[in-house]
Amino acid sequence: MTGRLVLGGAPLGQPGDVGPRLREVLATAEVLAVEDTRRLHRLAADLGVTFTGRLVSFYESVEQARLPGLVAAMQDGATVLLITDAGMPSVSDPGYTLVRAAIDAGIEVTSVPGPSAVVTALAVSGLPCDRFCFEGFLPRKGGERRSALAALAREPRTMVFYESPHRLADTLADAVGAFGTERPAAVCRELTKTHEEVRRGSLAELVEWAAEGVRGEITLVVGGSVAGPEALSPAELAREVAAEEAAGADRKEAIRAVVTRTGLPRRTVYDAVLAAKKP
């Protein structure tokens, strides 16, 4: 009899957010594949749950090595509970490889829905929630990160990112270069925890705030593009360039940022700047 794979949504910070179904599976699963065994022990203690299943560490650098054993256990009839440090497994966390391997082996994959930083941050951001895209973690290297953001300059949906607190200030500054100073955004820090904070404002305002240093788990929500290139008059283009310059860019950098954001030819933006200077 074939077993199954259960994806368990772990609390972002408050154990009370866990429902009875996760408690039940935690207590009865034959195998517990967990990102951090110490956190699993702490969560079980917080929930008052005693588990008897076999613990298997399952994190990024050992995922591939653990797959054959976990698939074999499920083929032998075991229920495997996959649980990561916080939120839903496989959403910028370990899990996708095991889900794919189980599906390919004809094994049932189900979930115990639970907390997710993506939708939680989106809901409290104050930004449009009817359409959104999740971009996960941006590249760590500055040049790659700027290229990734530039590619999203005309994305109309609200965007959700995960980010390290140590890179947040740089990411926000790069977002200004790609999206402009006035693009609305929200930094959601330590969601559901004691020191939860949601800082809302323009990207320029958030850059200034983050320069002082930020700690904790970060989810960044950025509003989508609301104006296509056809909606921007020469005067508006000139104001966009002026805003970039006011934020610290030189003329060449400011024009490049507006070109990237609007998709317009460089000559069009440059001519708009010249026209604005004429009496």
Image: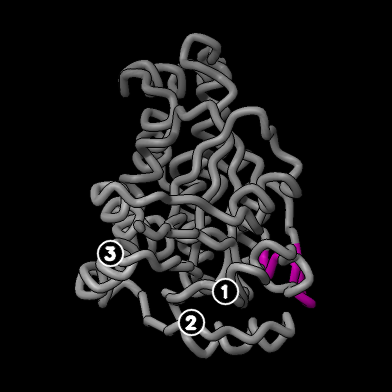
Residue 17 placement, left or right of 95: right
The image quadrant that residue 117 belongs to is bottom right
Name the residue tied to disc 2.
53
Question: Residue 71, which numbered label?
Answer: 3
The correct choice, above or below, for 219 with respect to 61 in the image is: above
Name the residue tied to disc 1.
28
Horizontal and vertical percent position of residue 239: 57, 28
User: Which structural element holds mark 1?
Assistant: helix
Mark 1 nearby-residue class (10 Å; few <14, some 14–19, many ≥20): some
Residue 11 placement, left or right of 56: right
Horizontal and vertical percent position of residue 197: 76, 66
Measure how far apart labels 2 and 1 are at the Cα level.
Answer: 7 Å
Q: Magenta stretch mostly in which secondary structure?
A: loop
User: Which structural element holds mark 2?
Assistant: loop
Q: Are marks 1 and 3 in contact (CB under 8 Å)?
A: no
Segment colored magenta: 189-197
Q: Are marks 2 and 1 in contact (CB under 8 Å)?
A: yes
Measure how far apart labels 1 and 3 are at the Cα level.
Answer: 18 Å
Residue for point 59% across, 68% down: 25
Residue 237 shows in the view: yes
User: Which structural element holds mark 3?
Assistant: helix
Question: Which of the two labelled residues, at mark 3 and mark 2, occupies the earlier sequence position?
Answer: 2
